[in-house]
Image: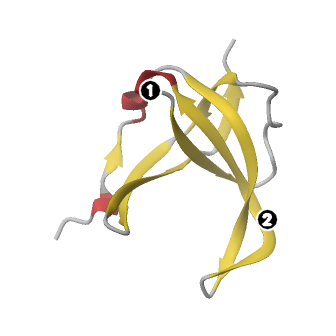
Amino acid sequence: MLNLRDLRIDPASLGRKMLLVDVMPAYEYKDGKRTETVTGYRYVVCLAEHRLEKLSVRIDGPQQMEQPEGFVDVEFTDLVVTGYESQGKLQFSAKASGIFLVD
């Protein structure tokens, strides 16, 4: 049987402009409960070509970019986007290996 989590969404379909609006720590979970251990960071971007819908992209490891004042145009390295179902609704998960500013 095909599993929704096995499907990959082409990052190009998200549009060419991603605006970073927030940076927050990503925590480790054990037995379904959040610990105080930070394992990476979530970079929240608005997708300009999708009515400014937000997408949170997780990057494990040290923080790579500070939270901007306002928003800045960014791109991700090795971006992988998948879908999953939660509480009867389609949700999206995204991870990458890096983030950088677009000039």
Which residue corresponds to the image point at 53% horizontal and 39% vertical from the top-left?
Answer: 54
Query: Number of callouts in the render?
Result: 2
Indicate left or right for 40 with 6 as reference. right
Which residue shows up at 40% across the image and 52% down it?
A: 82
Residue picked out by circle 1? 51
Q: Earlier in the sequence, mark 2 or mark 1?
A: 2
> In front: 85, or 98?
85
Q: Is residue 53 left or right of residue 71?
A: left
Name, please, the residue furthest toward the top. Answer: 103
Determine the residue located farthest toward the left in the rendered image: 1
Question: Residue 10 at what x, y percent from top left?
Answer: 36, 37
Q: Is residue 43 above or below residue 50?
A: below
Say what amino acid the circle numbered 1 marks: Arg
Q: Nearer the viewer, residue 42 or 88?
A: 88
Q: Quadrant of the N terminus?
A: bottom left
Residue at image point 40% right, 28% down: 12
Q: Position of residue 61 (x, y in %)?
A: 76, 55
**From the viewer's perspective, is 78 left or right of 23?**
left
Residue 2 x, y percent position in the rendering: 19, 65
Q: Amino acid at mark 2?
A: Val
Circle nearer the viewer, 2 or 1: 1
* Tag 2 secondary structure: strand
Badge 2 density bin: few <14, some 14–19, many ≥20, Cα 10 Å: some
Return the x and y of residue 78 as percentages of the image width and height: 54, 40
> For the view shown, which residue lies furthest in the bottom direction?
31
The residue indicated by pointer 2 is: 38
Density class for disc 1 (Cα within 10 Å; few <14, some 14-19, many ≥20) is few
Vertical placement of residue 4 versus 56, above or below: below
| Residue name at image x 47 percent, y 46 percent | 80
Image quarter of residue 23: top right
